[in-house]
Amino acid sequence: MAGSAFSTPYPSFSLDFGSVCVHTKRICALCASSPESRAFARGSVEGISGVRERRGSDGGKRKRREEEEESEKGQLYTAKNILVAVGGRPSKPNIPGIEHVIDSDAALDLPSRPEKIAIVGGGYIALEFAGIFNGLKIDVHVFIRQKKVLRGFDEEVRDFVAEQMSSRGVKFHIEQSPQAVTKSYDGLLSLKTNKETISGFSHVMFATGRKPNTKNLGLEDVGVKMDEHGAVVVDEYSRASVDSIWAVGDVTNRLNLTPVALMEAGAIARTIFGNEPTKPDYSAVPSSVFSQPPIGQVGLTEEKAIEMYGDVDVYTSNFKPLRATLSGLPDRVYIKVIVCAKTSKVLGVHMCGEDAPEIIQGIAIAVKAGLTKQNFDATVGVHPTTAEEIVTMRNPTRKVRRDTAAEAKTTHEAVSRK
């Protein structure tokens, strides 16, 4: 540890985990404020609390809902356009003992600090909570069905973040599907998978995805088409199968990121109120994973770039940042820049390391603007920073050409196995 290297003992500290959860819920409540909040008061938005189904143009509705509305003295609202933006909710598989499991919502409402926790899932939420709990010195086990975490991310970034998290104490159990959760007489939980059974967990958390929150909205009753997952099916302008209904965000199960939902809503506003039909633009959307270390990415992965462009140059750097060098910490940073070999256009930038999300927001402007590797090279770096590495990588780590793409893939798989 850094402290012992410089003969500086760490101060002792204590944490009231329950109070942290209470404070977190308070902050979340502010983000999802009531209709009386100042945010609503400043504008011309009227907030109405409650859940209602939508009537058709003929006023039809199921009888029990009519009775329920009448009993609640509910108000009927009509509008020329209705926007569905109800988001998603955690989804858990139907396995024996699922009643003993918590999800990401409940994880923010625990009365005490877990001692040992199993997290099932390999996506954003699973890794972020794994980092939080591991940082609190909790024994963390992550179970994933695939060989790697973060399906859909750049392969080398997937490898790097798992390696870094493992070095910090997180234990990964790969290619394991949950089969049952059992609770013993002492209150501790056991997780059975297709490969093993591990006992002694104080908590088992499932982060196995989210489902669109369309249940009981009555959308299907008025002809809104939904897919097999309950997501609202929309066209390229975010309009549902009923002309007066639109949908954005996780409820459409397209690109499930909060800023993307804002972008989609802006496009709808221009389409409806600005007489400027606008499609959401999903190109070069940046995203981040607040794991430890965090990830920032924008543009294409190496695999996707090869598939779409064939000839690409790949620049990579795996290094220890200055702050880790001075402190003696084992932290490292990984950066990858993917360039179209024919046009020199930067197709994607991927980073895993401290401050990656903050850095990638700025880089996303350059990628969105279609800047070239020469533009990056001509930019003066800010020294000493981690970000300057992005504009100082001069020589490609590898050059992949269309006729050698298959060979490069084979080589990469061999390296990954090693």
Image (cartoon, grey):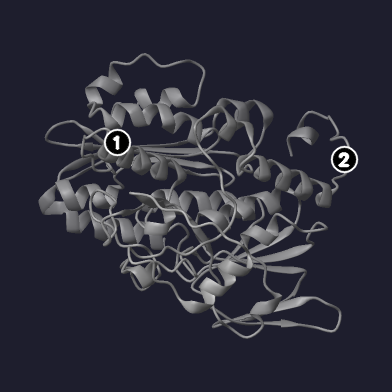
- Disc marking residue 11: none
* Quadrant in the picture for the C terminus: bottom left
| Residue 234, placed above or below residue 348 | below
| Residue 405, placed above or below residue 99 | above
Residue at 58% x, 83% y is 95
The residue tagged 1 is 273
The residue tagged 2 is 13
| Residue nearer the viewer, 347 or 87 | 87
| Residue nearer the viewer, 145 or 227 | 227
- Residue 61 picture location, percent across and down: 43, 72
Type of the residue with mark 2: Phe
- Which element carries disc 1, helix, strand or loop? helix
Q: Using residue 23 as the reference point, say whether residue 54 is left or right of it.
A: left
The answer, for residue 46, to whether it is visible in the render is yes
Mark 1 and mark 2: Cα distance apart in space: 55 Å
- Which element carries disc 2, helix, strand or loop? loop
- Residue 413 picture location, percent across and down: 32, 61
* Quadrant in the picture for the N terminus: top right
Q: Using residue 185 as the reference point, say whether residue 126 is left or right of it.
A: left
Q: Quadrant of residue 73?
A: bottom right
